Amino acid sequence: MSALRELNEEIALCQQCEIARYRTKVVPGEGAEDADILFIGEAPGWHEDQQGRPFVGQAGQYLDKLLASINLKREQVYIANVIKCRPQGNRDPLPVEIHNCRKWLERQIELIHPKMIVTLGRYSMDMFFPGKSIGKIHGTAQKKDNVIYYAMYHPAAALHQQSLRQAIEADMLRIPALLAQAESVAEAKQQPRQLGMFEV
């Protein structure tokens, strides 16, 4: 069994958060284990919780279309979420849940070793672009430790706000060129900052 599959089995046993008691299925993530691109969403929704797979509802169907626009299928990329269990009532993930799940996501990143991480929505964006606003930085890339980080709106945003659809589609179309020019994306300058005691 691959290291990633083993990790996903470990994730399935996690009971660290209250929400673990209410889940139908854990949603660790899926896709190519050697994917060049890792997409990170926010949290599983109802459909994901039922099937144990990420992005299978309406937002997932839209993500499939976005991938097709750059000649990719979901089997060629890896898709995961910031948290692996569905919050009740589709509420936003809590800081403690994001903190508890962070180790799983970090190990997934280590094992997949993607060339590019695409953050979908503000919760995954916050992990890699702390303190930034998605309205300002969507469609922009930065490089750190040889990985390109690229911020996008969550596909679900286009379902609620038609006006964002154009921005999301345009941002997606930039991905192949960014990957092809990986060498020329600027390395992010390290911001010296004080770490708070509870910072995740």
Image (cartoon, rainbow, N blue to C red):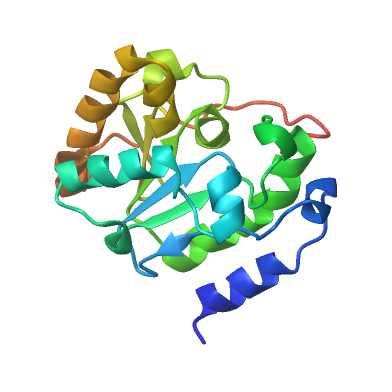
Q: Up-down: is 82 above or below 191?
A: below
At a point 28% along the width and 62% down the height, the residue shown is 76
Q: Nearer the viewer, residue 158 or 152?
A: 158
Q: In percent of the image, x 69 and y 58: which residue is there?
A: 24
Q: Is residue 20 above or below residue 92?
A: below
Vertical placement of residue 6 versus 163, above or below: below
Taking depth in this image into account, of 144 and 65 the one nearest to the observer is 65
- Locate the C terminus by quadrant: top right
- Please indicate whether residue 18 sits to the left or right of residue 75 in the image: right
Whether residue 93 is visible to the viewer of this picture, yes or no, is no
Query: Which of 62 and 5 lies nearest the eye of the viewer?
Result: 62
Instruction: Tell me what residue is drawn at x 79 percent, y 51 percent.
Output: 22
Looking at the picture, how far across and down is residue 121, in whole percent? 48, 30
Residue 119 pos. (x, y %)? 44, 38
In this rendering, does residue 10 appear at all?
yes
Q: Quadrant of residue 126?
A: top right
Residue found 74% across the figure and 39% down from its top: 88
Q: Is residue 170 left or right of residue 8?
A: left
Residue 48 pos. (x, y %):
55, 51
Asked where in the image residue 90 lies, by quadrant, the reply is: top right
Foreground of the two, 88 or 179: 88
